[in-house]
Image: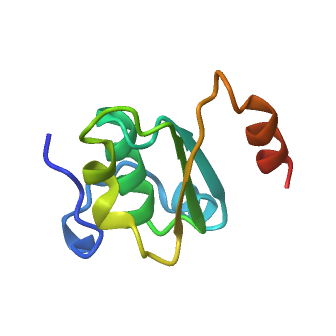
Amino acid sequence: MNPVNPSQKQNLPSLFTQSELDKIRNSKIVIFGGAGYIGSMVSQLFVAYEANKVIVIDNLSAEKSIRRIQPLIGKDNFEQFQYNLEKDMDQVEEFIEN
């Protein structure tokens, strides 16, 4: 599976109805493990579909993790946080509540 290139919107698959796209564009989407193989694809997809905010929470333990989300870093609708859910769950819960 090739990564989604957020700058090539014309090549996006039609996965969502217009109503669903409108909801995505008004949503804050939190993706746990968003720098992993599958999570990074999902992250790229939601950034490309112009979600209001895509937030990736990942411990970045895999060597390739940061490289998978590198194209998203610096995008206005993307944020990445490094947390280990086993150790930092209190911080993650506080983050999500805010």
The answer to whether residue 16 is left or right of residue 98 is: left
| Image point (40%, 68%), residue name | 73
- Residue in the picture at 14% in, 39% down: 1
Q: Nearer the viewer, residue 23 or 35?
A: 35
Residue 42: quadrant of the picture: top left
Q: Tell me: 2 left or right of 39.
A: left
Q: Is residue 81 above or below residue 83?
A: below
Q: Residue at x 26, y 76 (%)?
A: 7
Image x and y of residue 58, in percent: 50, 39
Classify the position of the C terminus by image quarter: bottom right
Residue 14: where, in percent of width, then height? 31, 54
| Residue 58 higher or lower than 79, as above or below | above
Residue sitting at the far left = 2
Q: Nearer the viewer, residue 52 or 79?
A: 79
Spot occupied by residue 6 in the image (x, y as percentages of width and height):
30, 69
Residue 15 horizontal side relative to residue 3, left or right: right
